[in-house]
Every structure is written in structure tokens, then in C-alpha cells.
Image: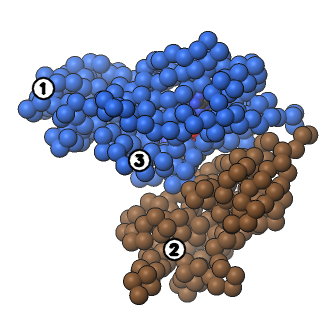
Amino acid sequence: MADIQYLAPRTLDEAVGAYAAAAGAARILAGGTDLLVQMRSGAVRPGVIIDIKKIAELTRIEETPDGGFRIGAAVTGAALAEHPRFGKVWPGVLEAVNLIGSKQVQGRASPGGNLCNASPAADSVPALVAAGATVTVQGPNGRREMPVEAVPAGPGRTSLAPGEIVVRFTLPPRPAGSGDAYLRMIPRTEMDIAVVGCGVNLTLRDGAVTAARVSLGAVAPTVLLVEDAAKALIGSRLEEAALEAAAAACRAACRPINDKRGTIAYRTRVAGVLLKRAAAIAAERAGRA
Amino acid sequence: MAKLHVSTTINGEPVEFLCSPQQSMLEVLRNTLGLTGTKEGCGTGDCGACSITLDGRLVCSCLMLAAEAEGREIGTIEGMAQGDRLHPLQRKFLELAALQCGICTPGVLVAAKALLDRNPDPTETEVRYWLAGNLCRCTGYDKIVRAVLETAAEMREEAAR
Ligand SMILES: Cc1cc2nc3c(=O)[nH]c(=O)nc-3n(C[C@H](O)[C@H](O)[C@H](O)COP(=O)(O)OP(=O)(O)OC[C@H]3O[C@@H](n4cnc5c(N)ncnc54)[C@H](O)[C@@H]3O)c2cc1C
Ligand code: FES
Ligand code: FES
């Protein structure tokens, strides 16, 4: 086996420098729950492994004064679950992150790794998209900010430029009366890959929806932000007609594959069902917020 | 190939070892350090036989590079008994025959202890979800779950005394 190098820089500048210098031969290591599996199978053979977990900004969880959150890209699911406030403000995002694998996997897996691994079925991604989260990315040309949904480019591919590292996620402040939810369809209750995933984020005033974001996972090459579904919900009181219109928009947005986990027809139908169920949970949470 | 020198703490003792950059923690525990209580089932994060704690957090040692142990604290099954005194979970597993071939057992015990350290009074559902990443080919899980619940009850009684 060729010589391989392990680096654990303490600053982002060092990490970006090493990543860019390795020109495609390097891989970023966060929790390793995708990367080390891929290395073991021989699917990925990096020359340099850059462990980003010693960089403080990448493992920090911060609540901003305006009530938003900044989550380091390499924060583990277990650490996020232990934060005293995050799960109260963003229960849907937390549920989605905590659906990733077992307790052992949760001890390592990060939302940054989930996003950058670019699986169409990644569980945390639809929830983060529904939340309206953005990512801060740092590369050789400095920092930029982009919506989460702009990162995946196709199965296993991202739109990150060479040398760019995801630094953190930013979740916006929550207006009163807001709630979110993420549901996935799997044939069992644990340890499986989503057949369909659906994230819904709602703000209600006096029972009427004033803002909505809807996203779907595992039904297209990348996560989908379904704006037509959100439009169908905004202004409604989540009556059956509005929910059915939003479900229809979800079904129309689906471009799934046929595989052993689900057929095209099944995934498409389930997308509509999950939209209705997730919207009900989000609305219930919004009512309490 | 250039070896990395790693200084870490395992079960409370300072330990140093050499490893290659892509070697897993599991490989080093078993093959370099002779700590063979930690088992390999799958090598891909699915079975939990390789469970250890890293700074108190439950992780799969097959999905961790040995190099990542630098400056951290590792806990393995070898650290669970205090000398000849078995941990209450270990005693209960023997008493209730919550194991057959035993390959999954070290991982199950490490995981169950991580649960009870956080939650001394888990429900059956909480135990089952917590241990969902520990596969057992033999027992059908019921005896394992019962042993964890009974240990938790005993440890609570002990603590109340
Ligand atoms: C047993 C098991 C069960 C699983 N179950 C699920 C599941 O239910 N749902 C699910 O969605 N996933 C699941 N996964 C997949 C995996 O755990 C997740 O995708 C996880 O979030 C990956 O995070 P990580 O920190 O381990 O990533 P890593 O493996 O460290 O990295 C993943 C990829 O992203 C790149 N990367 C990581 N961080 C950054 C960054 N900050 N900037 C740029 N690139 C980066 C890496 O180079 C690598 O290519 C499972 C995996 C296992 C082993
Ligand atoms: S050997 Fe690590 S999870 Fe199976
Ligand atoms: S006792 Fe044999 S695998 Fe669990």
C-alpha cells in the first residue's frame, strides 16, 4: 500500500492549506463513519487524511444573541443531542441528525460528513434544508456562505471547489409559533437507509401558516427543496385540501430510482404521505412554541 | 512506511504505541496492544462488537483511526471489572445467561454500561434502541435486555442504600 499521511491540524487555515496542496489526493476526516467504511472497501484511497476535529470552530455549538444557532460541521450527533437548547428550538433537525446509525455511530457522525458524503438518502440534509440552514465554507480563496441545498451535486458529488471545507451550519432565529419535523420511511425502526425522507418547517399565526419550507430526501439524485409544496401550505390552516395540494407537489417533484428499497411508484406515493404526517407534527410543535 | 507515535490513555493507564496512519483503533487494540476483548464482527460499523468509549462516548473502534487516540481517553471491556470484582452488568449477564457464543458480549457490555452511566433507570424501549447497534446472532436479545434492566434496578437499589 502506498504511503498515506494523517494530519490533525489545529487551525482551519492549516487544514485548508494542506487540503488544497494535496490537490485531490486528500480526504477530510470528520467522524469517519462514511470515509473509513469507503477506505476499507477500497472505494476511496486517499494519500492524505486531514482530521478536522481538533479545530475548535468545527466542533462548537453556539446560540447566537438573536436566537439562531451555529453548529460546527464536525459536531457529533451525540454532542448535539446533549445541548440543552438546540433540540427544543429545532426538534426536527435534531431528530434527523440522531436518526443516523446507532449510538456508536452517533458518537462520531457529523452533519458536515452527512452533507459532504452526498448520499441522496442522507437523513440530516432534508431537515437542514427545511430549516433554511446555510453553510459557511472555507477554501483557498477565503470564505463563502451558501444554502445547504446548494452543496450536493449528485450521488457522492458536491459543488464544493477544490480545497474547500465546510466550516459550520447556521440556522436562522425562530419566530414565535414555529415548529419543524423530519420523518423517514424505512422498513424497520433503526439502522437502515431512508426509502424517502421529508422535512417540514412551519410558522403559524392564529392557526394560519405564515411561512413554510418543505424538503424531500432519497427521491432524486440530490435533496429537493419543494417550493410548490410550501406555497400550497402558506396561507392555509392546514386543511385537508391544502395538505393534499402540498402532497401532490411533493409527488410531482419526485424523480426517484427503482431499487431493492423501493420502487418509483412506492417512493413517490410515500413522499406525499410523509409530507402530511411531518406537517402535522411540525404544526403541533408550532402550536406549543 | 513511516509510523506514527501515539500517546493515549487506555482504561486509566497511559499507553504509547506505534501505528500506521490508516490502521484502525480496533486493529491496534487487538494486534499491537493484545487487548483482544474488543471483537471484530463486520469492520463497517454495523455490528457493535468493537464498541469502546472515546472520552466517555460510545464509538465503534473499527471506524476510528488509531492515530485519533492521541491525547484522548479510551475505555475497553478490559477496564470494566475492578481486578477480580466483575461489574454488576458482567455478573448479571452470567447469572441470567445473557450470552451464548460470547462474541457480541464485550461490545454489548461496553454499550450497556455507557447507557447506565447516563441513564440509571432506562425503560425497556430505551435499552432496545440504545443497543440497536449491537448485533447478537445467538440470544435473540431478550435475555440481554432483561439483564440490563435487572442490573439497572440492582444498581439503583445499591445507590439508595
Ligand atoms: C452503521 C452505519 C449506519 C448509518 N446510518 C445512517 C443513517 O441512518 N442515515 C444517514 O444519513 N447516514 C447513515 N450512515 C452514514 C454516515 O454515518 C453519515 O453520513 C454521517 O453523517 C457521516 O458523518 P461523518 O462525520 O462520519 O463523515 P466522514 O466519514 O468523516 O466524512 C464523510 C465524507 O464527507 C467529507 N467531509 C466530512 N466533513 C467535511 C467537511 N467539514 N468539509 C468537507 N468535506 C467533509 C469526507 O471527506 C468524506 O468524503 C451510517 C453509517 C454507518 C457506518
Ligand atoms: S466490527 Fe466495528 S461495528 Fe462491527
Ligand atoms: S452471544 Fe453469540 S453473538 Fe451474541
Tag nearer the camera, 1 or 3? 3
Quarter of the rendering containing residue B33:
bottom right
Chain drawn in blue: A
Q: Residues within 10 Å of mark 2 (few under 14, many from 20)?
A: many
- Using the rendered image of the protein, determine whether residue A133 is visible from the camera's viewpoint: yes
**Residue sitting at x 62%, y 82%:** B86
Residue on which the image places disc 3: A83
Disc 1 element: loop
Q: Chain of mark 1?
A: A
Furthest-left residue in view? A206
Find the distance from the CA under tag 2 to the CA under tag 1: 50 Å
Are discs 2 and 3 less than 8 Å apart at CB?
no
Type of the residue with mark 2: Ile
Q: Which mark is residue B144?
A: 2
Type of the residue with mark 1: Ser
Q: Residue B54's spot in the image, x, y percent?
A: 62, 55
Type of the residue with mark 3: His
Q: How is the image coloured?
A: by chain
**Residue sitting at x 80%, y 34%:** A5
Q: Residues within 10 Å of mark 3 (few under 14, many from 20)?
A: few
Q: Which color is chain B depicted in?
A: brown
Q: Which mark is residue A285?
A: none
| Residue labelled 2 has its Cβ within 8 Å of some atom of ligand 3 | yes
**Residue sitting at x 28%, y 37%:** A180
Query: The C terminus of chain A is located in which quarter?
Result: top left
Q: Residues within 10 Å of mark 1 (few under 14, many from 20)?
A: some
User: Could you tell whether A120 is left or right of A246 in the image?
Assistant: right
